[in-house]
């Protein structure tokens, strides 16, 4: 089944890419939603949002560990 074409006026956005990456991190997504995302997202946006998200998570964990382990 081919991905659906995006509706007129519904371009990709960073916000939509952020939601796609968040669903990916959570590991839950319907097949229909996945197919819709494939048709609508810009791969470059996904890569950039994913890298920034991973960096934010890693820095947050490092900060949390430093805060908990501080004397």
Image (cartoon, rainbow, N blue to C red):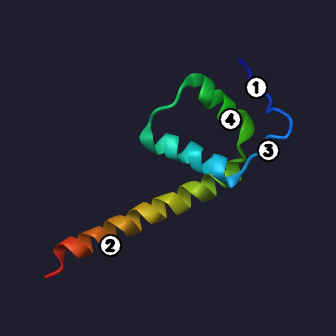
Q: Quadrant for the N terminus, please.
A: top right
Could you tell me residue 22's position as x and y percent? 51, 46
Could you tell me residue 21's position as x and y percent? 55, 47
3 or 1: mark nearer the eye: 3
4 or 3: mark nearer the eye: 3
**Mark 4 falls on what kind of element?**
helix
- Give the residue number, with chain letter if any, for mark 3: 11
**Mark 2 falls on what kind of element?**
helix
Indicate which disc, 3 or 1, sits on the residue closer to the N terminus.
1
Indicate which disc, 2 or 4, sits on the residue closer to the N terminus.
4
3D distance between C-alphas at marks 4 and 1: 9 Å
Indicate which disc, 3 or 2, sits on the residue closer to the N terminus.
3
**Mark 3 falls on what kind of element?**
loop
Res 23 label: none
**What's the residue at 85%, 40% (across, down)?**
9
Which residue extends farthest front? 9
Res 63 label: 2
Indicate which disc, 4 or 3, sits on the residue closer to the N terminus.
3
Could you tell me residue 65's position as x and y percent? 25, 69
- Give the residue number, with chain letter if any, for mark 4: 38
């Amino acid at each position: 089944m081919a991905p659906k074409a995006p509706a007129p006026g519904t371009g990709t956005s960073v916000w939509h890419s952020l939601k796609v990456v968040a669903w990916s991190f959570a590991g839950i997504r319907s097949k229909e939603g996945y197919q819709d995302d494939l048709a609508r997202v810009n791969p470059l946006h996904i890569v950039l949002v994913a890298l920034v998200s991973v960096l934010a998570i890693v820095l947050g964990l490092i900060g949390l560990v430093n805060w908990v382990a501080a004397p």
